[in-house]
Image: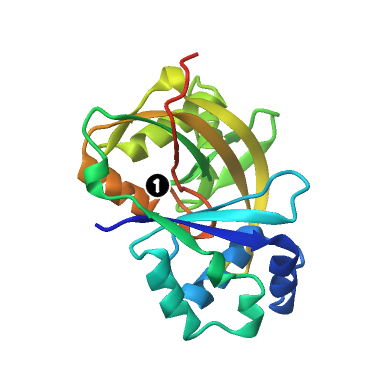
Amino acid sequence: MNLHLIELPVPMRALHLWAGSRGMSSPFDEGLALHHLLGEAFGPGVLQPFRLMVAPGATIGTLYSYATHDADALRTAARGVITPALAEVVTLDHLRSLPRPVSGWSAGQRLGFDIRLRPVVRLASTLSGKTETGAEVAFRKGAEVDAFLAAVLRDQQTTREETYLAWLSERLGPAATLDLAATRLASFERTRVQRNGRRLEGPDAGIHGTLTITDPQLFAELLGRGLGRHRSYGYGMLLLRPPQRRR
């Protein structure tokens, strides 16, 4: 797999205006807007997974993604189809890339990471019980449920952080193992997203940590594929960093 890390500046006001012109502004779902924007500019799934990083108060964010084409190839393909409205948001001249070849990874290599996840599970059977707050809930077979809530309803003795790290560790294998002593739940909130005309409420978690590569080929494939559900909406991209300190 020829993988490239893509970087693209995103003017936030232009993104909101474009989404508004498509009827996606009430309420605004950033992941949904970018899903459609990137699909129309580069093709479905070409820039996936992706992650938009916006500093507090900033007017321009930075979108990162993994792709099997470099910036030059992406620009060439997009220039033939991009519209003036898209060009207000997708500034092709500022698109950049760096190669991430399989040869750059080795078994035993430790890497830090930052990832935004939607840690949910699909239920194999109906599930009901009381939440942490004592509210009675019930879910049908096949429902998408917060992994921690599912653990609580099954009377498992665990914390939210423990549940989410176990969820992540399972999805890293067999490409890599998680260093639990150097990994933490950095942020958490519950958010509502739009999917296929439906509003879904669920967990939105940020995890910072360190992993060890066990299979370089599988690790490269994992980077290109992303982790978990909602990967085409801004979740599941491993942004790599130097290894983290252990707690």
Q: Is residue 243 above or below residue 103?
A: above
Three-letter code, disc 1: Ala
Left or right, 9 with respect to 57, comes to left
Q: In the figure, residue 16 lies in which quadrant?
A: bottom right
Neighbours of disc 1 within 10 Å: few (<14), some (14-19), many (20+): few
Q: Which sits in the foreground, 132 or 181?
A: 181
Residue at the outermost top position: 247
Q: Residue at x 47, y 18 (%)?
A: 245
Image position, residue 55 (x, y; %): 69, 45
- Residue at image position (61%, 77%) is 86
**Residue at 70%, 74% in the rendered image:** 18
Count all numbered tags in the image, as a single digit.
1
Front-most of residues 173 and 238: 238
- Above or below, 87 relative to 169: below
Regarding mark 1 in the picture, which secondary structure is present there?
A: loop
Q: Is residue 199 visible?
A: no
Report the residue at 45% width, 53% height from top. 142
- On the question of residue 244 being in view, the answer is yes
Question: Which quadrant does the N terminus fall into?
Answer: bottom left
- Residue at numbered disc 1: 124
Hey, which residue is sitting farthest front in the picture?
93
- In the picture shown, does residue 85 fall above or below 117? below
Nearer to me, 206 or 52: 52
